[in-house]
Every structure is written in C-alpha cells, then in structure tokens.
Amino acid sequence: MDDSRIDFQTEVLIIGSGIAGGITALQLADAGVEVTLVNRSKIPEESNTYYAQGGIVYSGEHDSPELLAEDIIRAGAGYCSTNAVKLLTMEGPKLTREILIEKLAVPFDMTESHELSLAREGGHSISRIVHATDATGMAIELALMKAILIRKNIHLLTGFTAVDLLTPAHHSLNRLRIYEPLSCAGAYLLDQESGSIVRCLARKTVLATGGIGQIFLRTTNPPGARGDGLAMAYRAGARVINSEFMQFHPTAFYQPNAPSFLISEAVRGAGAKLVGADGKPFMEKYDPVWKDLAPRDVVSRSIHQEMLVEDIPNVYLDLASYIPHEKVKEMFPFIYDQCLKYGIDMTVEPIPVVPAAHYFCGGVWVDEWGRSSVESLYAVGEVSCTGLHGANRLASTSLLEGLVWGYRAAQDIVGTLKDAPATMASDMPGWEDTSNETADLALISQDMSTLKQVMWNYVGLVRTTRRLQRAISELRHLEVEIERFYRAVKLNDDLVGLRNAVRTGIIVALAAWENKNSVGCHYRI
Ligand code: FAD
Ligand code: SIN
C-alpha cells in the first residue's frame, strides 16, 4: 500500500455496502459527490441485504399508506414513531419503483399477466411484497453493486474494517476541541491485507454497518452482523435507543450441527403451517385470528412455549401437506436447495425449525434525514433506529427502510456538504500501534463463543431479572478482559469484531434490564 492510503481524505465516507450504504453512495455519486464506500468483507456484496429472502414492501391491491401504517404500528406494539411510519408509507413504494425497478432494473418476479407478483407475510393484512423468488436480497444487492462499480466517483474499499470513528472532541491534537459539540470527522480503518490502520478524514460519515445477530448463538445473520457500527457510535457518544428490541425470527432451520439459515415467512404466507412432532398445526391455539401469520414475536413465543410443553428441541414447518409440490420448488428454490444440503426434502417432509436472532429494532437514534446526535455522523439501515419498527418489526419493511433513509441521508448530505467543515490532517493523530504481538485466535473464538452463549441463554427470547443481572455481570467481566487484550496485541478484523460484539451485548442487556415491561419482542417473565 502506498503512503497516501495511510492517511486519506474523502468528501463522504460510507461504512457498509448493503442496501442502506449502497443506496446512499449511489444517490450521492449521481449528485456529483465523491464517496468512499467501505466493506469489511473482501466480497463487495457481502451483507445481510444479500441474504434477504421474502422481499420488500411495495403496494397491494386496494392498498394505501394508511393500511400499511396500521400493519406497521400493530406489529410495533404501538411503540413506532408516527413520523417515521408516515415517511416510509408515503415515500417507500415510490422509491421502490423509481430506484429499484426503474434505475437498477432489479428482476422482481412477475405474474403471467405481467404484473409484479405480490406475496404476503406475517402481520400484513394483504399481499403487497415484491420479491425475486426467495432470494430477493441477492437480486437487489447484485443490481446495486453493478451500478456502484461503474460510478467513477465511488471508491470501493473491500477488506477494510472500520475500527473507530474519528471525533475531534476525543481525538484532536488540539485539546480545546473537547469543548465543542460532538462531531465526526471520518474513521480509522483497518486494511486487513497489510494490517495497517488508515486514518480516513471525511466531511460527512455514514454508518451503514447493519445488524447484530451474530452476538447470539442461533442467528439467521451472516458473520459480519456483530454490532460494529452500534459500538463505534456508542463510543463516539451518539445516542442509542430501543436496544432491548431484538427480533427473533420464528423459523430458522434446526439441526444440531447445521447453520440456522432462514426459512422465509413467505413460506407461511404461501400456506405452510407450523406443526408439532405429531404433525398437528398449533398456532390457532395461540392466535386464533392470525394463526401462522401472526406477528413474529407472537409466533416465536408460541413456538418456544410449544417446545417447553411438549419437551421437544424444535417444531416443524409443513409445506408438503399444504402447498403443491411443483409450487414449492418454483417459489422457494433457494430454501429447497439449502434444506436438501442437510438431508431434508421439503416437498415431502416437514422442515425442523426453531426461532433465531434475526433483526435489531433498536440502534443509533436518527432523525428523518438519517442524522445522528453527533454532528456530521449519519446512520442508515439496520444500524440506525428511526423509530419505524417500534417494539417489533413488520416483515419486509427493513429493506425499504434502508432504501428510504439511504436516499434521504444522501439528499441531506448533498444540501449541507459545502458548509461542513473539513478537519485538517494535522489536527488528528495517525494510528499508533502499541504492539506487534499477533492476537491468539483461540482466545478470540472462545470469548465470542462465551458471549453468544450468555446472550442466547440470558438475553434471548424470554428474559428474567435474574438472567439479565447475570448476563450484565458476565459481559462486563468479559469486556474488561477483551479491552486489555485489544490494547496488548496487533489488531485484526476478528478482534475488532469481538470488542464491538461484547459492547453491543452490554448495550442490549442493559436496555432489557431497564425495561421492566414485556412489549413487542422484549419479553420478560
Ligand atoms: P447490511 O445489508 O447488513 O450491510 C452492512 C454492511 O456493513 C455489510 O457490507 C458489512 O460487511 C459491513 N460492515 C459491518 N461492519 C463493518 C465494519 N466494521 N467495517 C466495514 N464494513 C462493515 N428484510 C426485508 O425487508 N425483507 C426480507 O426479505 C428480509 N429477509 C432477511 C433474511 C435474512 C436471512 C436476514 C439475515 C435478514 C433479512 N431481512 C429482510 C433484514 C434485512 O436484510 C436487513 O435488515 C437489511 O438488509 C440491512 O441492510 P443494511 O444496509 O442496513 O445492512
Ligand atoms: C423472511 O423472508 O421471512 C424475512 C423477511 C424479513 O425479515 O423481513
């Protein structure tokens, strides 16, 4: 790496290249702004977005912003920000058409009469979700990346991990900047290949690092979802809200040694039913009105209860008895192939499933333009909390939230960039390595495994005061050890992730402990 990369400046630094970061970058680039887009993965499209299955909310027959708002607020247990709901329901479908369908030409499924094919998922009162079979995220992310790669003013850095945000109040060489309001001037980035830490100065910084599912033992999320953005923002002094609301998806594949990949809610939307070991459907017992299509928190807790009462390690999702075989393969080719890899042919037998950590409804507080409480720092997508989801997210609204707030953050940045002060390189210290000792990977993986166990057992689907107290004390102890280790060895991506994951775990556990009421996906007994 040449020296200029040890220290470089950019107009806008965007950390994360899923739908939220990708859309922000695209819109900025098309407005003539120079952007640096960073992904810790070496694969540009690697993100939660890439694995999204069911689809993205659009607009159904006889649909209206009011009807969609009603569904979102019901799922969110009344905790949603009405302003955020209004924004998404008014602007979302229009942006889906203009950006995803017209600008990016995402290949959504069409009906025989050449209309967009609309699916239904839990908590939706009608069918209104557009999809590309059961691999919608892949279709969106690949189209987005194709557009990004041909924009000359987007510099894409893959294999670079953001380590910490640069905040003059904390980092400046000029001690007097401590008296200024908190602001962000870029980030330190770890170049995984060389092992050096790059100081990247930016007029505006956008966090788009996605979710936190990997801090739990069982999750539908890929390895990068470990709370990096949340922890970095927290350390920078940003306001973080609603962190007790971790959504557990009811149906992740279950076999003791298999990954817990997602079985889309669209499968139940198409008619499949949750059944016990005896093959009998059980959701009517728990929610006689919505049954298998009740909001996710209700279905997840019903499964949990069923497993307790029946003393079974999992329940089953039965497609074979309710959907014609040819339809199963045609509608869900990705899930079909995944299940077959682990010996389950879902056209003839039920799929073993359990709930798994899926989506973080809390995050870095932002306003309607994606602005955080720290000046010049934006957050978009799953790392942020717009208030849209309240205490529980309605299916297929998350890709849309990333699209809407990614677009809006770009608009705000374009309008304010020329007034944003540039921080001088001479004012910010470069990174200083404190050690050349290579980090012991066994320690990192054992700590990560401890964290996942603690979060799953004590801060999971069902929480109690004692479990939460135990979690907080174990996590605090773990964090002390990890911080000591972090300062004593040379950084790598896993260690950066571990440090962020444990802080994220503490943020979630403390919020869960403080909120004594069961609401939405935060459930205490
Ligand atoms: P992501 O898409 O996760 O992107 C985050 C990016 O940040 C990644 O590129 C990551 O590598 C990068 N990153 C993280 N940390 C760092 C760091 N320190 N430095 C540099 N880069 C970093 N939602 C729907 O609306 N519909 C669905 O059908 C749907 N299905 C889903 C299925 C699955 C299996 C999963 C896991 C989620 C699903 N969701 C769905 C939720 C939705 O996919 C996510 O909430 C959404 O994609 C988040 O987008 P994002 O841009 O905020 O983050
Ligand atoms: C799914 O396909 O079930 C996931 C949809 C979502 O998380 O919104």
Image (tube, rainbow, N blue to C red):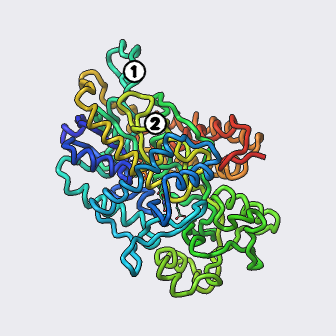
Which residue is pictured at 66% across the width and 52% down the height?
Answer: 456
Q: Earlier in the sequence, mark 2 or mark 1?
A: 1
**Image mark for residue 366:** 2
Front-most of residues 82 and 493: 82
Q: Nearer the viewer, mark 2 or mark 1?
A: 2
Which residue is pictured at 75% across the width and 70% down the height?
Answer: 282
Residue 180 pos. (x, y %): 38, 16
Q: Is residue 490 visible?
A: no
Task: Please state if 268 lies on the left or on the right of 224 as rendered.
Answer: right
What amino acid is found at the position of numbered circle 1 in the picture? Ala
Image position of 293 with respect to 189: above or below:
below
**Element at badge 1?**
helix
What amino acid is found at the position of numbered circle 2 in the picture? Val
Image position of 328 with respect to 161: above or below:
below
State whether label 2 is within 8 Å of ligand 1: no
Front-most of residues 400 and 173: 400
Q: Residues within 10 Å of mark 2 (few under 14, many from 20)?
A: many
Task: Please state if 424 lies on the left or on the right of 408 as rendered.
Answer: left
Q: Is residue 28 visible?
A: yes
Cα–Cα span, label 2 and label 1: 20 Å
- Residue 272, by quadrant, is bottom right
Q: Report the image quarter containing ligand 1.
A: bottom left
- Pointers 2 and 1 in contact (CB under 8 A)? no
Residue that numbered label 1 is attached to: 169
- Residue 44, by quadrant, is bottom left
Q: Residues within 10 Å of mark 1 (few under 14, many from 20)?
A: some
Which residue is pictured at 32% across the width and 63% down the height?
Answer: 101
Q: Residue furthest front?
A: 62
Residue 455 pos. (x, y %): 64, 48
Quarter of the image with the N terminus in it: top left
Which residue is pictured at 68% across the width and 61% down the height?
Answer: 299
Residue 328 pos. (x, y %): 53, 81
